[in-house]
Image (cartoon, rainbow, N blue to C red):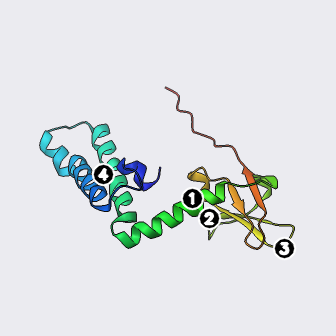
Amino acid sequence: MNSYEVLDVDPNTNFDIIKKTYQKLILKYHPDKLQQSGIKSQEIIEENNRKFQEIQKAWDNISTPQKKIQYDKELLAKSFKQDGVINEEIDLDDMEYDEEEEAYYSECRCGGIYKITVEDLENNINVVSCDVCSLKIKVLYEVIEDEIEE
């Protein structure tokens, strides 16, 4: 989810309204508020803390008009990265992995590089452009979720 989805606001909403929405949400999910309510369920506390941190992170991305402009540019770039004609599909297992950068690489036919990060994959971004030409690839991978036996 992007910051606007976390805050449940439209990206075109007035900045002051976005700020007020953030303030309401942060008060609603603040850990002190939950503590005052007397809730003792560890599961509810953990979920509340996760939501609080998610809201705070979302706000950090757009907390000033300048940050919002930059964030909007990054969102637009990601959307362009996902759109367009796919020239080839490459299996993630066929790409080279760089542990230090937490990214996978594959060489383009022009000599450039396709790069996809672990974070991209976690955010369901699987289309990447060559860093030199306009070719794009779709990275094929399978998400394996741990099965919990009860």
Labels 4 and 2: the sequence-earlier one: 4
Question: Is 30 left, or right, of 7 in this rendering?
Answer: left
Of circles 4 and 3, the one toward us is: 3
Vertical comparison of 32 with 112: above or below: above
Percent from the top left, x then y, of residue 71?
A: 46, 65
Identify the residue at horizontal 40%, vertical 66% (top origin). 68
Residue 69, image quadrant? bottom left
What amino acid type should be assigned to the residue bearing mark 1? Glu
What amino acid type should be assigned to the residue bearing mark 2? Glu
Vertical comparison of 106 with 94: above or below: below
What amino acid type should be assigned to the residue bearing mark 3? Gly
Q: Give the secondary structure at mark 4.
A: helix
Of circles 3 and 1, the one toward us is: 3
Residue 11, image quadrant? bottom left
Q: Disc 2 marks which residue?
A: 102
Q: Give the secondary structure at mark 1.
A: helix
Percent from the top left, x then y, of residue 76?
A: 55, 61
Q: Disc 3 marks which residue?
A: 111
Labels 3 and 1: the sequence-earlier one: 3
Q: Disc 1 marks which residue?
A: 119
Label 1: how many residues lie within 10 Å, few (<14), some (14-19) or many (20+)? few
In space, the residues marked 1 and 2 are separated at their CA atoms by 8 Å
Q: Disc 4 marks which residue?
A: 52
What amino acid type should be assigned to the residue bearing mark 4? Phe
In space, the residues marked 4 and 2 are separated at their CA atoms by 27 Å
Of circles 1 and 2, the one toward us is: 1
Label 4: how many residues lie within 10 Å, few (<14), some (14-19) or many (20+)? some
Labels 4 and 3: the sequence-earlier one: 4
Q: Are marks 2 and 3 in contact (CB under 8 Å)?
A: no
Labels 1 and 4: the sequence-earlier one: 4
